[in-house]
Amino acid sequence: MKRLFLTLLVALSTATASAQDTPQTTLPRIKLQAGMYQMDVQVAQTPEQRSIGLMFRAEMPTHEGMLFVFEQPSTQCFWMKNTLLPLTAAFVADDGTIVNLADMKPQTTDSHCSTKPVRFVLEMNQGWFAKKGLKAGSRLAGVAFKP
């Protein structure tokens, strides 16, 4: 019986470790807009979802990203540990205004922070915002943001 318990415990530990090394792809999705551009984004709302973010993802379609939602506005800082894709983080105010942008290199622990307290951070493939002409002061629209 003890041997069976240990076998099950090892199997469970292995399964849990494997799950932590895989991308999270089943989060809820919403549509956001930036002018004429539309984004299909996953929404990371819980501390666990936010801590995993886009880690372990080998690719992401151009129009997709991840919106990180926090309970209250504060200075938000992001890093790229275990993140394989180069990303740009848009730090976004409650009304959808981009406060600042930060290009982030894969697999680094450099901090990239908002310049003001925000509740939202939108990560897209690096260069997406620049290609669309979006910068600090540009406005995003969607159900997450107050009109």
Image: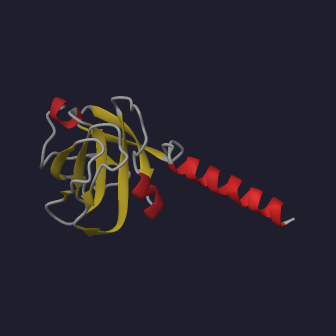
Q: From the viewer's perspective, is 27 left or right of 124?
A: right
Q: Quadrant of the C terminus?
A: bottom left
The one of 82 and 31 positioned closer to us in this rendering: 82
Quick check: can you spot residue 94?
Answer: no
Q: Is residue 40 above or below residue 142?
A: above
Q: From the viewer's perspective, is 138 left or right of 85?
A: left
Q: Residue at x 57, y 48 (%)?
A: 19
The one of 23 and 44 positioned closer to us in this rendering: 23
Q: From the viewer's perspective, is 34 left or right of 54?
A: left
Quick check: can you spot residue 1?
Answer: yes
Q: From the viewer's perspective, is 29 left or right of 140?
A: right
Q: Residue at x 36, y 54 (%)?
A: 68
Q: Residue at x 30, y 44 (%)?
A: 107
Q: Is residue 46 above or below residue 72?
A: above
Q: Residue at x 43, y 42 (%)?
A: 56
Q: Quadrant of the N terminus?
A: bottom right
x, y percent for residue 57: 42, 38
The one of 96 and 16 positioned closer to us in this rendering: 16
Name of the residue lying farthest toward the right: 1
Q: Quadrant of residue 59?
A: top left
x, y percent for residue 12: 68, 56
The one of 16 and 63 positioned closer to us in this rendering: 16
x, y percent for residue 40: 40, 37
